[in-house]
Image (cartoon, helix red, strand yellow):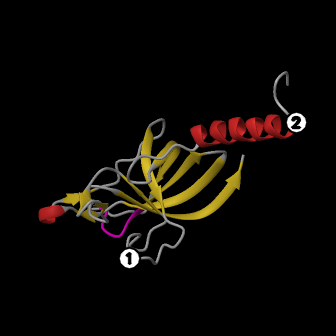
Amino acid sequence: MRGLSKARFAVAVVLAVGSMWQGACIQDQLGRGSYKVVQRTDDPNCSPDRLNCRVQVVLLHEGHKLYATALDYKADVGGTVKHCNLRAGETVKCKFFSDRNSEDAGGYDLICGDQLWQGRLTTTGGNELLKIYKDELQ
């Protein structure tokens, strides 16, 4: 504390801790953070074309274990059918939406991927579309 008043020292500590916390919560320009896929379970009763099927995944993010379902049959731009490409062990960039009913969220809690429309993440098949049903602190 040499050369610093107690008040300035306290402010310096708060700023340092605040910047460490922000470093752990880094988001990119689209507001996406890193999520690690730790588990994936395909629906065993799913039809061969996987129409109306969902995949259950478990993701780790900032000390939270998120249990979610992902669409396994999505229409991509041009009508191409895409299936869920989330795999255990990979880290993906996802944007969390606090209001899944907002226009940007399109009914989902998380949108993972890079496909954009007018500068925003889309709910087309090029992205992974997830609904969270359970959130546990680790």
Principal SS element in the magenta part? loop
Q: Is 113 on the left or on the right of 3, as rendered?
A: left
Q: Residue 102 location in percent, x, y?
A: 44, 76
Sequence-earlier tag: 2 or 1: 2
Q: For the residues carrying marks 2 and 1, which lies nearer the camera in this image?
A: 2
Q: Are marks 2 and 1 in contact (CB under 8 Å)?
A: no
**Is label 1 in a helix, a strand or a loop?**
loop
Q: Residue 56 location in percent, x, y?
A: 50, 56
Q: Which residues are magenta?
A: 50-54
Q: Which of the numbered marks, if any, corresponds to residue 89?
A: none
Q: Residue 113 location in percent, x, y?
A: 34, 51
Q: Residues within 10 Å of mark 2 (few under 14, many from 20)?
A: few
Q: Is 91 on the left or on the right of 58, as rendered?
A: left
Q: Residue at x 23, y 64 (%)?
A: 118
Q: Residue at x 82, y 29 (%)?
A: 4
Q: Nearer the viewer, residue 111 or 44?
A: 111
Would residue 51 be counted in the magenta stretch? yes
Q: Residues within 10 Å of mark 1 (few under 14, many from 20)?
A: few
Q: Is 93 on the left or on the right of 22, as rendered?
A: left
**As shown in the figure, which amino acid type bears the numbered disc 1?**
Glu
Q: What residue does disc 2 label?
A: 6
Q: Nearer the viewer, residue 1 or 41?
A: 1
Q: What residue does disc 1 label?
A: 103
**Is label 2 in a helix, a strand or a loop?**
helix
Please, which residue is most extreme toward the right here?
6
Q: Residue at x 42, y 46 (%)?
A: 28
